[in-house]
Amino acid sequence: MTAPLLDIKDLCAWYGPSQALHGASLQLHAGELVTLLGRNGAGKSTLLKTVMGMVNPCAGSILFQGQELLGRAPHHIGRMGLAFCPDDRGIYATLSVRENLRLPPVVAQGGMTEDELYELFPNLAERARSAGTHLSGGEQQMLAIARILRTGARLLLLDEPTEGLAPVIVDRIGELIRKLKGRGYTILLVEQNVHFAAELADRHYLMESGRVTDMFDAATLLRDFDAVTARIGV
């Protein structure tokens, strides 16, 4: 097997005196869609933020294409081809949909044009002049994902994109993520909706108390579904 695109080893991170990650390790290969499952407070979002250089202090190793990310500033990491979609979506309320889309810099060739994004997200095309505050929760989530697709990043870190959304919108987000995987994106997806994750991912990591405690392939998760969901508490 080729070397992993993202290789996280013994990752530790702290918020002040509180340690949030306790030696977490995982690997992600190019073109994979991998989910990170776990209870609230398990450290899933912290892991994504630490990869993006948003949590300090931290220790361990995060290799992306063989290059160490620890110690780099978030904007340097973004320019290496990683993009983060936060769970709060980060939509600027006073800016229009079009202005929100244009905010992130293009970091590499291959990013989607505005026309391509509007084709992928027809709702956003209809609301292009609308302010962020006028969008529904589902539209805000679509805008948050669309915004990072414009950058040209090929590794996407998605933090609970289905949280708080109606089932019909969750289905649309699932269809979108399948399309992105089909286009060759590599995706690390934080989720608590195990049903949603089980239908999408190649592999699943389970986090507990700041550690990655298990890894399941898709078939194993489906076979042991009840046991896994019991450990997650859903």
Image: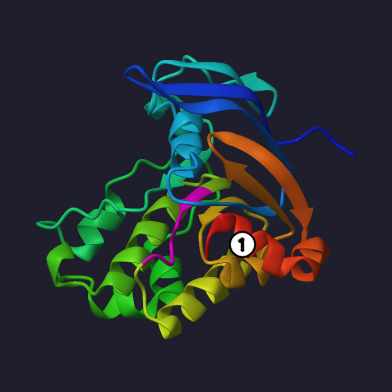
Pointer 1 residue: 230
Using the image as rendered, state which of residue 24 and residue 88 is in the foreground: 24
Q: Quadrant of the N terminus?
A: top right
Taking the view exactly as shown, the residue that stands out farthest to the bottom is: 168
Local packing at callout 1 (Cα closer than 10 Å; few below 14, some 14-19, many 20+) is: few
Taking the view exactly as shown, the residue that stands out farthest to the right is: 1
Using the image as rendered, state which of residue 56 and residue 69 is in the foreground: 56
**What residue range appears in magenta?**
157-163
Residue 62, percent across and down?
61, 24
Q: Could one spot residue 179 in this view of the protein? A: no
Residue at 23% x, 71% y is: 128
SS for dot 1: helix
Residue 200, percent across and down?
66, 67
Residue 56, percent across and down?
39, 19
Using the image as rendered, state which of residue 31 and residue 234 is in the foreground: 234
Residue 99: name its quadrant. Answer: bottom left
Identify whether 139 is placed above or below 160.
below
Identify whether 171 is placed above or below 72.
below
